[in-house]
Amino acid sequence: MGTINVIGLGYIGLPTALMFASHDVKIVGTDYNEELVKTLQSGQLTFDENGLDVLFTDALSKGIEFSTEYISTDIYIIAVPTPYDKLSKKIDPSYVVKAVENVMSVCPKGATVVIESTVAPGTIDKFIRPVVEANNYIIGEDLNIVHAPERIIPGNMVYELKYNSRTIGADNKDVGETIKALYGVFCLGDIVVTDIRTAEMTKIVENTYRDINIAFANELAKICRIDNLDVYEIIKIASMHPRVNILQPGPGVGGHCISVDPWFLVGDYPGLANIILAARKINDSMPEFVLERVHDIMKEKAMSDLTRVGLYGLTYKENVDDVRESPSLQLLEAMEKHLAPTLKSYDPYVKKVILKNQYHNFDEFLTDVDFVIIMVGHDEIKDNMKKLTGKIILDTKNICNLEGTYKL
């Protein structure tokens, strides 16, 4: 097996490159960010992730290389970002298109490009194939295109890389089987070979399904709040039914999968993706719902000083450092629109200063606030819940059992 060039060394590309390298596959990881590449070359990771340090050490011992340059080889794996336009709800494929163009400038005839980046259904037909053909490449002869959408989540990446099933979308079954064998070097889950458009749609459907289920739980929380019912008790009892499994409500949906991917269907299938659109609106409304709860609680407690209110947690989920689309940042953005002062905030995983009034010490944060809004259920706060005794608490994650705690 020759060298694989992994393009994009972020939350998906880096763990994927390290996993291949640790299983004795020759890897060159490429990223346009010079600082990121230099950090990796110096033996330092660029983000925190459970088990990634061990994988990194192993990959370094196996000779993984990092570069800002693309190399000439037979297989490329593209794992660059695919942002979406918040107004049109359509994907921006420009990073993927640019990566493919860069590959074509160096690759030999017959090379295979594997796109791991999550894309909207039809993206490869609409944007990638025309670019390849415009460069006088014959797809299937000069260049093979494969879609193998990533399926891992921050906080559990290393485990899920190994054990989650994978989908390989290819024009040619033989090419698909070759890439299946490649991922089979480390993937112990089922690997299904299908066509490219099916692979594109399958990934979006997975995240949309979860988004809709979360929206149901969040809508229940709103309904139960009106009649002062315990939504958590209701979900617990209802889920005892053998065919019912309701997820937990929360302050919103973040990350770069569940909160983004469903919009691709809304943008591409207007008038058809009705349940999907409703779910997106419900989940996007939750940070505002949290603010309404804060307002009601402050009124009940005759508390008028917003400067003594603090958000615990800035990441989009527990025990990771990923803040993309996080409910906390959505909440603060909503407050900014109303010219409200920035709340105090603290997150043990967010080391960089990204906000005004951001704390980096838990005890100092608690000293300066009277009202704590728990937005993320990090292990840190679960293990130190007694420190919140005497505070006004709004627990959006249902992890605090201190007397007098308010819930969604």
Image (cartoon, helix red, strand yellow):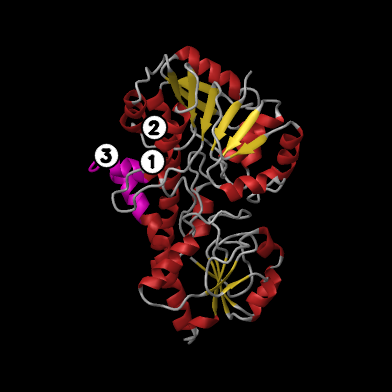
- First in sequence: mark 1 vs mark 3: 1
Q: CA distance from mark 2 to mark 1?
A: 19 Å
Secondary structure found at label 2: helix
Write the start and end of the magenta stretch as one range.
Answer: 263-281
How packed mark 2 is, by other alpha carbons closer than 10 Å (few <14, some 14-19, many 20 or more), is: some
Amino acid marked by disc 1: Ser
Residue 139, by quadrant, is: top left
- Numbered circle sitting on residue 269: 3
Q: Residue at x 66, y 65 (%)?
A: 381
Q: Residue at x 38, y 60 (%)?
A: 285
- Numbered circle sitting on residue 333: none
Residue 176, position in %: x, y? 49, 18
- First in sequence: mark 2 vs mark 1: 1
Residue 368, position in %: x, y? 61, 81
Instruction: Decide if residue 381 is on the left or right side of residue 286.
Output: right
- First in sequence: mark 3 vs mark 2: 2
How many marks can you see?
A: 3
Q: Residue furthest left?
A: 271
Amino acid marked by disc 3: Tyr
Q: Residue at x 60, y 48 (%)?
A: 36
Secondary structure found at label 1: helix
Closest to the camera, between mark 1 and mark 3, is 1
Instruction: Decide if residue 275 is on the left or right side of residue 305.
Output: left
Query: In the rendered structure, does residue 270 fall within the stretch colored magenta?
Result: yes
Residue 365, position in %: x, y? 63, 75
Quickly name the residue at label 1: 94
Assign the magenta stretch its main secondary structure: helix
Quickly name the residue at label 2: 201
Q: CA distance from mark 1 to mark 3?
A: 21 Å
Query: In the rendered structure, does residue 278 fall within the stretch colored magenta?
Result: yes
Q: Residue at x 57, y 44 (%)?
A: 11
